[in-house]
Amino acid sequence: MSQSNQHDTTTLALMLGERVVESTQTHPLTTVAGAALAGWVLARGMPKFAVRIGLSAGLRLVGARVMDELAQLSQEPEPSPQRATTSPSPEVTRTTSRAM
């Protein structure tokens, strides 16, 4: 392989990597579906047990990611409604109790 071909291949790989990252950020489900399709096409020649192991690991990773996202969502504090009335300051309370 010549030096220029190697640089062209490296440039192409970097450009492809950037597009995959961009696609993942803008359209995550479409990217996952495309990756699953590519994996299915490439795995057609693989033994069934290897495909099952790969699918099992992938599903576990996706499940763990979903559970992490749900845990983060449940830990976010809900915005508290603003109260229209405010409680009196402690000094006002003390002076009114003495006056009685």
Image (spheres, helix red, strand yellow):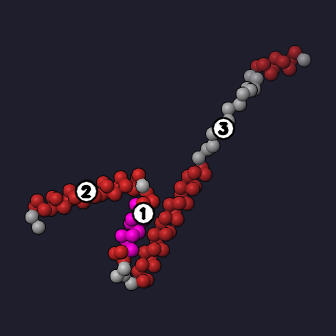
- Is 35 inside the magenta-drawn segment? yes
Figure check: 64 above or below 49: above
Task: Name the element at disc 2.
Answer: helix
Figure check: 74 above or below 63: above
Locate residue 89 relative to residue 51 in the image: left or right.
right
Residue at coordinates 61% horizontally, 51% vertically from top-left?
74
Residue at coordinates 45% horizontally, 74% vertically from top-left?
55
Q: Is 99 or 28 nearer to us in this picture?
A: 28
Hey, what amino acid is under mark 2? Leu
Whether residue 90 appears in this view of the structure is no
Residue at coordinates 34% horizontally, 82% vertically from top-left?
45
List the residue tagged with mark 2.
Answer: 14
Q: In the displayed image of the protein, which residue is found farthest to the right?
A: 100
Magenta stretch bounds: 31-40
Q: Position of residue 91 (x, y in %)?
A: 76, 19
Figure check: 36 above or below 74: below
- Do the residues bearing badges 1 and 3 touch, measured as CB atoms within 8 Å? no
User: Which of the numbered marks, if any, corresponds to residue 80?
Assistant: 3
Q: In the displayed image of the protein, which residue is found farthest to the top?
A: 99
Task: Name the element at disc 1.
Answer: helix
List the residue tagged with mark 1.
Answer: 32
Q: Nearer the viewer, mark 1 or mark 2?
A: 1
Residue at coordinates 31% horizontally, 55% vertically from top-left?
19
Q: Mark 1 or mark 2, which has the lower sequence index?
A: 2
Whether residue 52 appears in this view of the structure is yes
Hey, what amino acid is under mark 1? Val
Hey, what amino acid is under mark 3? Ser
The answer for how far apart the CA atoms under marks 1 and 3 are is: 37 Å
**Dot 1 alpha-carbon crowd within 10 angstroms: few under 14, some 14 to 19, many 20 or more:** few
**Dot 3 alpha-carbon crowd within 10 angstroms: few under 14, some 14 to 19, many 20 or more:** few
